[in-house]
Image (cartoon, rainbow, N blue to C red):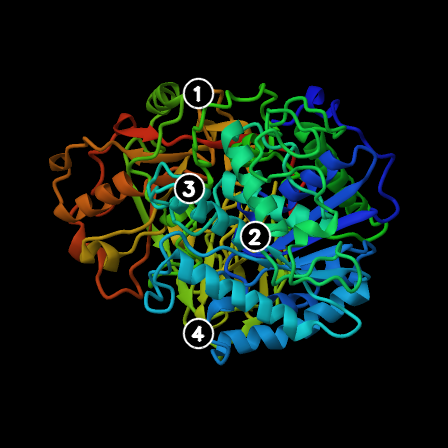
Amino acid sequence: MVGPPFLAMATLPAGIDSPMPLALLFVGNSYVFVNELDQTTGALFLDADPTGETLAHREATGGYTLPQHLADADGTNGDTPLRQALVTGTQAWTWTLLQDQSQIPGFPEDQPEVMASLAALPGLDALIEANGGQTMLLMTWGRRDGDSTNPEWYPDYPTMQTKLADGYLRYAAAITTDTRTAWVAPAGYGFRHVWQDAVDAGEDPLDPAARFYRLYIEDGSHPSPLGTYLAACVIYSSISGDVCSGRAAPPSLSAADVVAVQAAADAAVFEESGDIAYPWQGAGEDTGEQPGDTGAKDTADDPEDTGGAGGGASSGGCGCSNTNPGRGWVAAVATLVLLRRRMGRRTAQGAARGPVSSSGAVSGQLGASVASFLGLSTLAACADPAADSGIPNADSAALAADTRSPGHYFPDAAPWTTAVADAPLDPDNDALIAGLASRGWGTGHFQIDFSIEVLEADETTERVALEPTSDFYSPDCDQTPVPLPEGGNVEGEADYACASGGDCHLLVKAEHEARLYEMWRADKRGDTFRGGCLAVWDMDRVYPPEGRGEQCTSADAAGYPIAPLLFTADEVASGTIDHAIRFILPNESIRDGEYYHPATHATNASGGGADALPYGAHLRLKAGFDETRLADPDARVVARALQTYGMFLADGGNIALTAEADARSTHKWADLFEDGSHALWGIEPDDFEVVALQGEAVPLTFECERSGL
């Protein structure tokens, strides 16, 4: 957790009432927001210049393509955070880095997705130019094992890397003119150098112990903290013309890894990218020669020199003292944090309109994965240079491809569909389970609620304007017309009228627009549609840890979506539930005053102490649970899902587990569970264990800072 002793180390600017001198805007997807590539890059610039001021910011949505970014920026999708950052805000971005979806750039030029990206680039570049800055394309890296979804086109890493590189160079050529250059930051070449290092050493790059292998998280696509740092080094050198060797690095990385990837980045930019021009090269210079000979890299004879360039100490820039007069990693990151906080505060107060943060990394508490990686949660001394732990980022390990499997509401990277059977336990597991056991389930038994419906809308479904009630909170909730399918109903009611005064959840899936509408206390009577909080979710998005925004609620108290956590009669009948499940506890059994990601909110109605489960708690049924304690065979399907995917604490109430109503399913609960809502009564609190809570506790403030859909 960020605290005063840490922040005191930063060299703070007087304020940012005027635009920042060096401002970096990252426009991409999960390759950018995993491990905070924007903040990692910004920290390198601040470490290099003790007196400079740098702002780094991102607008990144999982799986996003360049055409989608253009629609966000040019107003097609309304006043989006990207439009606010790039078009309607006051900040002039020195550099805007564009990243396409991870596969598209390397596809054949006549592929529709490539043609769409090429068509979108001029529009994006024009908006960037109008903002006053330069465009730089972020060449990404091939997937570690190639692309299993396109095995003939991308059979392995080297092939995929070559095709991606060609694609990004094609992108740059398409928008480069006699008067304006589209630059390229070849992060993929840095990955390629690490691959080749292993091959040259007679090693297998795909050995899990190999450094190349450890540039990725488990999915072999998204970067590990080490991979993110390598990409940041390449971006830093591509813009500055300065070597990365000797620069500071996150203390979570081993010194040996830091030295190696700094050298890889230096080689990628200054020795192995003769096909790329850089902004620091002299006018008229022959860029076909070694860019490293331009004079920008005049501080080291050999990029493999582990002493670091520019007189860096043998620490390899791991964040401890070196002879460079830089701020150091911790101070640099602290400065970035405060600058972005100030920018967000100015916007909230209605002053000069700046970008709206899409990451939440500085508007609330940082998750432990990001905090420990960036150096925000530890000021430890450098690791032993001989140590080479390669420990992956625990939170990032859950991220997978940006694809959405049939039947899932969100891409497979979402926490709701991440298996946790082998995930580590929380250090406070014993105390938390003991606390749960002492309080028990809300009704005294592990009971099932079957009352929530999920309706389906299409292009023809009528949309009805919403009249907010006192249960609608701004900016947490979305005020937009809601599709109301004919013949539908809210939770616990026969139609859309909330006659009983209950929660009256309304859940509508609009597959044609990839949107999920979820509402609390919806109530339509006649032509009047009133209700509480409406949360609209983008089903194609891999949400960051802070979801729709830090301190923001949704139709559930924890800030989660509801529908992805409901199990259905058809799933049980099939014998497989491949996602986590929603569970609730009485308010007095939920920890008061704080929450953990992926929750983004809590309530002041919670009354539990330190041994109570907080919102964000993820429980799993113990592997050794005896299924024969459940008399109904179909109930054991639910038990196995609880062992594999677990259940998330989502709201306050009495009936522990939530299933979807069967009004629109093929199979019916009465045919599956002989004991109905009592089918799981054999499961007790101490049959569960607590999966390690994500990051650090976020104190509840109710100061929602939205980050878009």
Q: Nearer the viewer, mark 2 or mark 1?
A: 2
Q: Residue at x 33, y 69 (%)?
A: 152
**383 or 617, which lies in front?**
383
Q: Residue 409: where, in percent of width, then height? A: 41, 59
Q: Give the distance between the C-alpha atoms of the residues marked 3 and 4, in whole angstroms.
A: 42 Å
Q: Nearer the viewer, mark 3 or mark 1?
A: 3
**216 or 86, which lies in front?**
216
Q: Earlier in the sequence, mark 3 or mark 1?
A: 3
Up/down of 444 relative to 168, above or below: above
Where residue 438 sits, quadrant-wise, is: top left
Up/down of 571 relative to 248, above or below: below
Q: Give the distance between the C-alpha atoms of the residues marked 2 and 1, in whole angstroms.
A: 45 Å
Q: Earlier in the sequence, mark 4 or mark 1?
A: 4
Q: Secondary structure at mark 3?
A: helix
Q: Give the distance between the C-alpha atoms of the residues marked 3 and 1, in whole angstroms.
A: 27 Å
Check disc 1: other Cα within 10 Å, few if <14, some if 14-19, many if 20+: some
Quadrant the N terminus occupies: top right
Instruction: Give residue 187's mark.
Output: 2
Q: Residue at x 34, y 39 (%)?
A: 208
Up/down of 67 relative to 199, above or below: below
Check disc 4: other Cα within 10 Å, few if <14, some if 14-19, many if 20+: few
Q: Residue 538: where, in percent of width, then height? A: 52, 60
Up/down of 366 relative to 487, above or below: above
Q: Which residue in the structure is indicated by mark 1?
A: 611
Q: Amino acid at mark 1?
A: Asp
Q: Which residue in the structure is indicated by mark 3?
A: 397
Where residue 553 sits, quadrant-wise, is: top right
Q: Residue 643: where, in percent of width, then height? A: 26, 39
Q: Secondary structure at mark 2?
A: helix
Label 4 close to label 2 by CB (< 8 Å) = no
Q: Secondary structure at mark 1?
A: loop
